Image: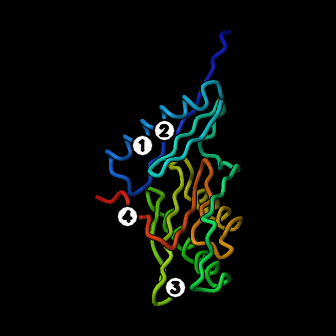
Amino acid sequence: MASYDRTYGLALCRGDASSNDCKACVLAASSEILKLCPNDKGAIIWYEACYLKYMDADFFGKIDEDQLSMWNLNNVSMIEPQKLDQMVHELLANLSQKASETPKMFARGELKMDESLKTHGMVQCSRNLSDVDCQKCLSDSISTFCCNGKQAGGMFNGSCYVRYDIHPFINLYIN
């Protein structure tokens, strides 16, 4: 019997990316991942508007447990760190619920923290997850990270991601 090598792949664009931005991002990510990981059996590359993942094992419908967190190292000085953490958790939890109920599995929003400060949030799941697994992936990501008074941060894996920032970043791809 013949042996077949299989590769499973996924490209996911931000829910607010235009078709042209999505296509350009996936093409750039495809080119770059081949340069960076020419002989790897699995890799993930993240860009602002998309991510690309491939593996030699079937990952469809399964939550990716590997996570990467990123932070802006600057602290928010206008609000107490505990209040920031609480409000960011509230925002991301609300967005997670919305995302798990929409076909794009994407949600974005903002929360006014005081007269001069808003926090902006975005969450998204890969569409190979069920709505229940999407909610679980996002909830797990939110519970394992946040915020320690930092201005921005995100938790990324191959199945979902959560991100917040006190500076607007969400409308980058709206036409």
In this rendering, the answer to whether 11 lies above or below 92 is: above
What amino acid is found at the position of numbered circle 1 in the picture? Answer: Cys
* Furthest residue toward bottom: 115
| 57 sits to left or right of 14 | right
Q: Secondary structure at mark 1?
A: helix
| Nearer-the-camera pick, 8 or 112 | 112
| Nearer-the-camera pick, 106 or 28 | 28
The residue labelled by disc 2 is 29
Which mark sits nearer the N-terminus, 2 or 4?
A: 2
Q: CA distance from mark 1 to mark 3?
A: 33 Å
The residue labelled by disc 4 is 171
Which mark sits nearer the N-terminus, 3 or 4?
A: 3
Q: CA distance from mark 1 to mark 4?
A: 16 Å
Please say if the residues under marks 2 and 1 sit with CB atoms less than 8 Å apart: yes
Q: CA distance from mark 3 to mark 4?
A: 19 Å
Q: CA distance from mark 2 to mark 4?
A: 21 Å
Please say if the residues under marks 1 and 3 sit with CB atoms less than 8 Å apart: no
Q: Position of residue 145 (x, y in %)?
A: 68, 66
Mark 1 nearby-residue class (10 Å; few <14, some 14–19, many ≥20): many
Quarter of the figure with the C terminus: bottom left
Q: Position of residue 118 (x, y in %)?
A: 48, 79
The residue labelled by disc 3 is 113
The residue labelled by disc 1 is 25
Q: Quadrant of residue 174?
A: bottom left
